[in-house]
Amino acid sequence: MSNDAFISIQNVDKFFGKFQAIDNVSMDIGHGEFFSLLGASGCGKTTLLRMLAGFENPSKGEIYIDGQPMSEVPPHHRPVNMVFQSYAIFPHLNVRDNIAYGLRRQKLTKQARADKVDEMLDLIALPGYGDRAANELSGGQRQRIALARALILKPKVLLLDEPLGALDKQLREQMQLELRALQRQVGITFVFVTHDQEEALTLSDRVAVMSAGTVLQMDTPSGLYETPKTRQVASFIGTMNFFEAEVKSTNGAMMNIEAQGLGNLQLPRGERHFNEGEAVQVAIRPEKLLLTDDKPEGDGQMVQGQLRNSSYLGERSHFYVAIDGVDAPVAVSAQNRTRFAPDPSDERPVWLNWSDDAIVVLAKD
Ligand SMILES: Nc1ncnc2c1ncn2[C@@H]1O[C@H](COP(=O)(O)OP(=O)(O)O)[C@@H](O)[C@H]1O
Ligand SMILES: [Mg+2]
């Protein structure tokens, strides 16, 4: 375990009968970090969270929180609390009693209890809401109450299982900002589960991308987006164009790659080691391609293609360009900087250009 890891998950397996839901997962999460588990439904996110909470035990491996092994520690003795997707507040209790629910085992004076609840109502920006009935609250307000109820016990770790999943898009985006601000304010470690990649990128310090019980890659949001390690991660986080390619030669810090459709590319070798003759994939994000009608000036990287179709999305448009030697049309994304752009639907010859650092080279999978 590294010294600054507040949560350390070490070689954890989880079996349900013969079914393996978690396969040799290891991760260290720092104190005060906003850490997300991201992956498609069924990949094991909730199972991992439930093992942190103590509702399930690992079949193999160990979980440490704050330096302590958790295997013998029951849920209510762990320094964690959990918030669920469904509005887990009691419909028959008012806001005050919902938030104070977790304090029922503590011997507090009425005043001390009321003060703690008021502190939480301020924290979630709902001062004065204490006497409201649960059914007089909006979805967003209920989810804030659920957060307050989890935070009133001052856990060292808050586990959040798709807490914004039931909210509509606009409210969800507003709650994302609030949640991030709240986490900074209370300064405790958040382990957040989502299947929504945009949500994970917006909120997190670091993200673990999961698939079928394993961790594919763990990195900062920009690290995942700009330097994905595999095709699976590259296509799960955002959109990516892929081109079959081969390493022709390597020379010191540079390598020469022949990519289908793009031609010959001179690229820095970076951290990864590729051999001469190795089949690889070249990948490039849609927004890193610049589409022009006229041939770009200079001798930078460029290719000619045929604009096939496009879609208008308000603040940007997507274009699909056919390139000789490439099966799938290449996706290009462009900001609509001018108000009255030329009709983008015209099929016509166009040019694509990009800078060297736009290209990611991936091992063939
Ligand atoms: N108690 C259980 N018994 C049997 N299978 C389970 C149990 N809990 C989860 N699973 C299975 O483990 C896999 C991972 O589930 P889960 O952790 O809930 O995924 P996620 O939260 O990523 O959607 C799924 O295939 C699910 O059906
Ligand atoms: Mg789940």
Image (spheres, rainbow, N blue to C red):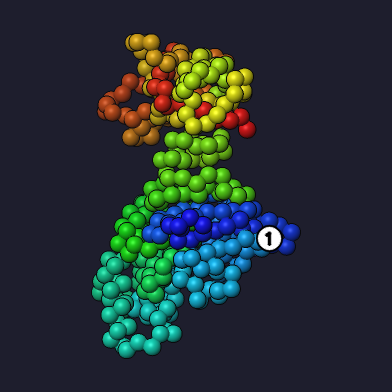
Does residue 94 appear in this view? no
Other residues around mark 1 within 10 Å, as few (<14) / some (14–19) / many (≥20): some
Q: Residue furthest right?
A: 18
Front residue of 297/335: it is 297
Q: Is residue 159 above or below residue 256?
A: below
Q: Is residue 65 above or below residue 92?
A: above
Residue visible at 40% across and 55% down in the picture:
34
- Which image quarter: residue 58? bottom right
Front residue of 74/203: it is 74
Q: Is residue 356 above or below residue 148?
A: above
Amino acid identity at mark 1 = Phe
Residue visible at 31% across and 78% down in the picture:
116
On the rendered structure, is 172 left or right of 24? left
Residue visible at 53% across and 25% down in the picture:
282
- Which image quarter: residue 276? top right
Percent from the top left, x then y, of residue 181? Answer: 31, 57
Q: Is residue 253 above or below residue 158?
A: above
The number of numbered discs placed on residues in the rendered structure image is: 1
User: Label 1, on which residue?
Assistant: 15
Residue visible at 58% across and 30% down in the picture:
363
User: Under 8 Å from ligand 1: the CB of mark 1?
Assistant: no
Percent from the top left, x then y, of residue 47? Answer: 58, 61
Front residue of 224/253: it is 253
On the rendered structure, is 239 left or right of 327? left
Percent from the top left, x then y, of residue 146? Answer: 41, 69
Which quarter of the figure is the C terminus placed in? Answer: top right
Front residue of 337/183: it is 183
Which element carries disc 1, helix, strand or loop? strand
Does residue 177 appear in this view? yes
